[in-house]
Image: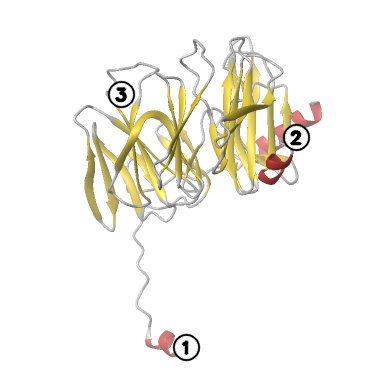
């Protein structure tokens, strides 16, 4: 463990300054922008979500209340899901449901699909899942057939808990849950038989499980709640292995109280790691790190001292900090209009 800590310190010293995310939109109003910058979803004012494309802007969601919006896409780029959060600053309930919409990718024709929170698209965007905190149920909906499924999770007096959900096949859901003693578990649920199986259970209480999926694998991270002295762990399994045996491979293990907030990419997992901390003062130095799955090598990617969150947006990985976005992966400069010059006569002749 001492060797690993020393290696982290080397990476901290070698971390380069990250570029800021440059767009024509203010960071506090931007809700989503495509990798190439062609489509952007902007919160224009409370209750109004705008769509910007091809130098035109329209208001396509106009709620009567002072709502704010979350806009998410998946790696498939077929559909998008939108959460409309009612009365964001006036109604602070932890079990408040959001109005949920879907629209085609880069489109402005939403249709309402239900109420809940933490909506997520799966399997070429043909499925959507979300959580209803009032009823403590996971909702699963096929957007083509409109068929609905429902999973009841454990009853617990914890309004902060929101299950993580990943769908790896049309009949197979993986989700996280906790029991009354505070132990987290990963549960596999078969939609065809409506039977659940616990495939992983934490050996320590007061930790949370995170899930993310990319390429052909499912990642599972275990991180302690804030202020709790527990270690951290990251495992992953190829989807083919999940069908066969459900076995997970451990690729990261630490005694540190890492923040987590994983983002899965095909060859690597990004997460927020605690580099060092003063437990008496409860002060942490936290950075974004990249865990390469093939080599299990961890590389520090930021030198910001206080990273708390990572955001995946259309394949781009961002760090929000003090009103700015810093770019870990993907294009960072979408703030200019560059038109290709008309070819010269010589260039036209060379093409011929």
**Category of crowding for the residue at label 2, using alpha-carbon neighbours closer than 10 angstroms: few (below 14), some (14–19), many (at least 20):** some
**Category of crowding for the residue at label 1, using alpha-carbon neighbours closer than 10 angstroms: few (below 14), some (14–19), many (at least 20):** few
Residue 330 location (% of width, % of height): 51, 50
**Res. 302 visible in picture:** no
Q: Nearer the viewer, mark 3 or mark 2?
A: 3
Residue 325 location (% of width, % of height): 44, 39
Residue positioned 41% across, 86% down in the render: 348
**Res. 242 visible in picture:** yes
CA gap, disc 2 to disc 1? 52 Å
Q: Which residue is mark 1?
A: 350
Residue positioned 74% across, 28% down in the render: 5
Disc number for residue 7: 2
CA gap, disc 3 to disc 2? 43 Å
Question: What is the secondary structure assignment of the residue under circle 3?
Answer: loop
Question: What is the secondary structure assignment of the residue under circle 2?
Answer: helix
31 is higher (above) or lower (below) than 2: below
19 is higher (above) or lower (below) than 174: below
Q: Which residue is mark 3?
A: 88
Residue 130 location (% of width, % of height): 44, 32
Q: Earlier in the sequence, mark 3 or mark 2?
A: 2
């Amino acid at each position: 463990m001492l060797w690993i800590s020393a290696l982290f310190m080397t990476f901290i010293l070698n971390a380069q300054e990250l570029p800021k995310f440059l767009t024509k939109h203010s960071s506090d109003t931007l809700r989503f922008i495509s990798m190439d910058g062609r489509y952007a979803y902007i919160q224009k004012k409370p209750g109004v979500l705008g769509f910007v494309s091809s130098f035109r802007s329209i208001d396509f969601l106009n709620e009567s209340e002072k709502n704010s919006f979350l806009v998410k896409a998946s790696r498939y780029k077929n559909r998008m899901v939108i959460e409309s959060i009612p009365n964001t600053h006036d109604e602070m309930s932890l079990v408040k449901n959001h109005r949920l919409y879907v629209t085609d990718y880069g489109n402005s024709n939403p249709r309402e699909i239900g109420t809940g929170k933490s909506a997520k698209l799966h399997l070429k965007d043909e499925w959507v899942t979300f959580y209803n905190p009032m009823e403590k149920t996971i909702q699963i909906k096929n957007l083509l057939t409109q068929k609905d499924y429902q999973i009841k999770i454990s009853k617990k007096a914890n309004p902060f808990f929101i299950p993580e959900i990943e769908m790896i096949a049309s009949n197979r859901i993986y989700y996280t849950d906790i029991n009354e003693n505070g132990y987290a578990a990963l549960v596999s649920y078969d939609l065809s038989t409506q039977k659940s199986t616990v495939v992983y259970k934490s050996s320590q209480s007061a930790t949370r499980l995170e899930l993310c999926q990319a390429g052909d694998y499912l990642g599972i991270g275990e991180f302690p709640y804030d202020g709790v002295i527990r270690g951290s762990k990251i495992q992953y399994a190829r989807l083919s292995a999940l069908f066969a045996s459900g076995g997970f491979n451990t690729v990261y293990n630490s005694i540190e109280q890492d923040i987590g907030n994983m983002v899965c990419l095909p060859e690597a997992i990004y997460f927020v790691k605690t580099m060092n901390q003063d437990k008496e003062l409860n002060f942490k130095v936290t950075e974004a790190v990249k865990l390469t799955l093939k080599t299990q090598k961890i590389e520090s990617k930021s030198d910001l001292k206080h990273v708390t969150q990572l955001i995946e947006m259309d394949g781009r990985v961002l760090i929000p900090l003090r009103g700015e976005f810093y770019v870990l992966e993907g294009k960072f400069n979408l703030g200019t209009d560059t038109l290709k010059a008309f070819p010269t006569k010589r260039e036209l002749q060379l093409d011929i």
